[in-house]
Every structure is written in C-alpha cells, then in structure tokens.
Amino acid sequence: MTTTLTYLEIMEMEQRKRAQLINSISGFRSTVLIGTIDVAGQTNVAIFSSIVHIGSNPPLLSFIMRPDSVERHTLTNIMDTGYYTINHIHNNIYEQAHQTSARYPKSVSEFDATGLTPEYKNEFVAPFVKESHIQIGMEFKERVTIEINQTSMVIGEIKAVYFPANCLEPDGFINLEKAGTITSAGLDSYHATQLLQRLEYAKP
Amino acid sequence: MTTTLTYLEIMEMEQRKRAQLINSISGFRSTVLIGTIDVAGQTNVAIFSSIVHIGSNPPLLSFIMRPDSVERHTLTNIMDTGYYTINHIHNNIYEQAHQTSARYPKSVSEFDATGLTPEYKNEFVAPFVKESHIQIGMEFKERVTIEINQTSMVIGEIKAVYFPANCLEPDGFINLEKAGTITSAGLDSYHATQLLQRLEYAKP
C-alpha cells in the first residue's frame, strides 16, 4: 500500500515530524566530522550530512550550512582561517560523532566534550579527528547563498587526503567499506553498508 | 599503514584515476533516478548521486549538474517544463539505474533503453519511475552556478511524495531500509545498508 503526501499535507505537519520526513526522504547521506579552529586556537568539531562531490579537476567538495540565525562556529572558523578538515565516521565513533550535534557553548570544544582527539599534521592549521580512518584537509574556496531559504553552500579544495593503504584499489577507487565508513539517514539513523557490486562504465 | 596524497600528487594523477579517487573519497551518496520530459513529450531518466536536503520548511532538495559542455537533457527538460521527479533506487533496479548513465542520443528515452517504466500520476507532468518504491514530485525553484568550476546546483521544492505505507515511522522518519533504498560510492559501486542504531537528539 502506498502513502501519498502532498505539498500542503507536508506543510501542515508538526515541525519536528516534517523535519524527520524531509531529512529522510532525501536518501542515504555522506556524513562526516568537520574539524576547525578559531583564531585564538579553540578547536571545534561538528557532524555534517551533506558532503557532495563538486569536481575532480581541481578536487572540490561542498557541504551545506543552515542559515546563520544561530551561532555557527564551524562556518565562522572556516571564514576566519580559510581551512577545515573532513573526517569519515566509522562504526566505533558514530555515537561520539552524533553527540557533536549538541549545542555546546563556544568556549567548549566538542573534541573535549565527546572524547574525540584533535590531530595536527604536516603544518595544516585545522585539526583532523585522530580516530577517523579517512581524513581530508580542505581549503575554503567559495560560499554560495541559496536565495530561497538563505542556506549556504561551502565549497573547498582538497589539499591532502589520508587513508589506510589497503583501501586504495588499482583504478583509484577508495574502498570505503574496508575503511569502515558508515552512512546515515534522516537526522539520527546510522547504517553500515554491504557491497552489492561495482559495475562497468555504462555504454549505450 | 596510512597513504598520504597531497594536492599536487592528486593533480598529477591520470584523469580517470583521479576521478575515481575524488568521487569515492566524498563518502556514500544519495543516488536516485531523475525523470523528466521535454516539450515534445520525449521522456528522459538519468542517475544522479548528489541529492542533498536543503530545507524542510518549505521542503527543498538539491542536486548537482556538471558544466554544460555536453548536452544535458535532464537540465534542459527541467528548465523548459519546470518539473522533474526523484526516484529512489533499490536492489532490483540498480543495474538498470546505472545503465541510464550511458550517453544515449536525445532521440532515445533511457526508459526504453533500460527497461524502466515511466509512470504518470495526479496530472504531474514529469514521469516517475514505476519500479521505484519511493517517488518524489519536484518543482524547479532555483539554479545556482558555482563560479570555481561552472557546475550547477539545481534546487527544487517537493510537491508530492509516494512511499510504502509501512515505511513511515510514528515520528515522521521514512525507513529507507524497509523500502530497499540503496546507496552508492564513487562512480560505480552500489551498496545495501544495515541499520546500526537510531540515536536520541543530542544534548550537551
């Protein structure tokens, strides 16, 4: 049996219920921890579920920030320092990763609050998450404002990637399952994956 | 053992290998079929792996289109008619879904070429994919150009959603696993999911 919900029925839903529905109906998500630091050296780490590939040459990734009606430490730190890190989440840290979404005051580092460990390497200014198996150093490139709801899209360039050597396949593909990378659905549902198949390049 | 690749090493990679690397390092993807129709009634269906939630009030989703250097039937049809559909992919149709990425001429509908079935309902102009368990009717709202590589982000508003009645949980969450929705990694890797846990709303 199929349920149908129209635009009007969606708009009439109670707010939290609508948020659960629309956040889940968009499909499985690329969910990561973004690490930043402010100009005074205070670290921040926060979970984001909107990473998208924008291009490979140069290598660009984007993520979405909700409007600035509340304080957004991640965005402020990126705009102030120009750098951030993207860190994959695996089976052993997804609960800590989720906990970074709590509204801690600016004076509290989510690293301390959740027991995740900041890691600095190769003189990169922003902290990586030491527990992550796949880590990406990013340089801020562009911020785009979406007019219809004042959401920001933040685009950065990959400056360095770190991953377990045995995850790199001969054709350049990173085997995310071997690294234990998980995915999420909606606002709070975490999922492991199981390979169905890699397919050949499609031709007519 | 950890492998490190710097920006320069990434830029020096052979093009297809770099594309595999950067497309996979972004994490698991929300991968769907987008259905459109042109003004003459010719249908089109194509796989996209960049669906992102932009907002719930109003309900908005985005996807990314690569630059217009080659013919992009999906984007042309959306701009001409104002409507499109987003259709989830499950275990039994992911091979057909992948095949829609082949470069068919404009005169060929990928529905015919891949054996997927166009479905029309409630006078919505764009075709749904009948085989999909979760279908979303979308109205075009905004196109944003990313300056750094001339990629387009297309934003639309949800006009209607269709899903199996037993997938809706009491809090509004759509259980994607129950619907069989799959995820993908990189350009060609398809994955089923296995629930780890739904977590409580995080508080400090």
Image (cartoon, coloured by chain):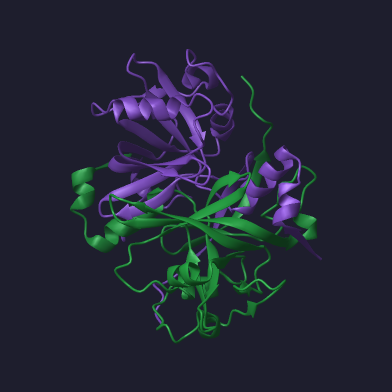
Chain colours: A green, B purple
Given residues A28 and A169, the one toward you in this image is A169
Where residue A8 sits in the image (x, y, percent)? Answer: 18, 45
Where residue B164 sits in the image (x, y, percent)? Answer: 36, 42
> Which residue sits at x=37%, y=25%?
B77
Name above or below for residue A144 compared with residue B140: below
Image-based side of B145 in relation to B182, left or right: left
Image-based side of A113 in relation to B142, left or right: right
> Which residue sits at x=74%, y=57%?
B5
Mark count? 0
Q: Quadrant of residue A180?
A: bottom right
Image-based side of B65 in relation to B12, left or right: left
Name above or below for residue A78 compared with residue A203: below
Residue B57 in view of the camera: yes
Where residue B94 sits in the image (x, y, percent)? Answer: 56, 35
> Which residue sits at x=50%, y=21%?
B110
Residue B174 in view of the camera: no
Where residue A22 sits in the image (x, y, percent)? Answer: 34, 52
Given residues B69 and B46, the one toward you in this image is B69
Q: Quadrant of the C terminus of chain A?
A: top right
Q: Quadrant of the N terminus of chain A?
A: top left
Given residues A80 and B173, the one toward you in this image is A80
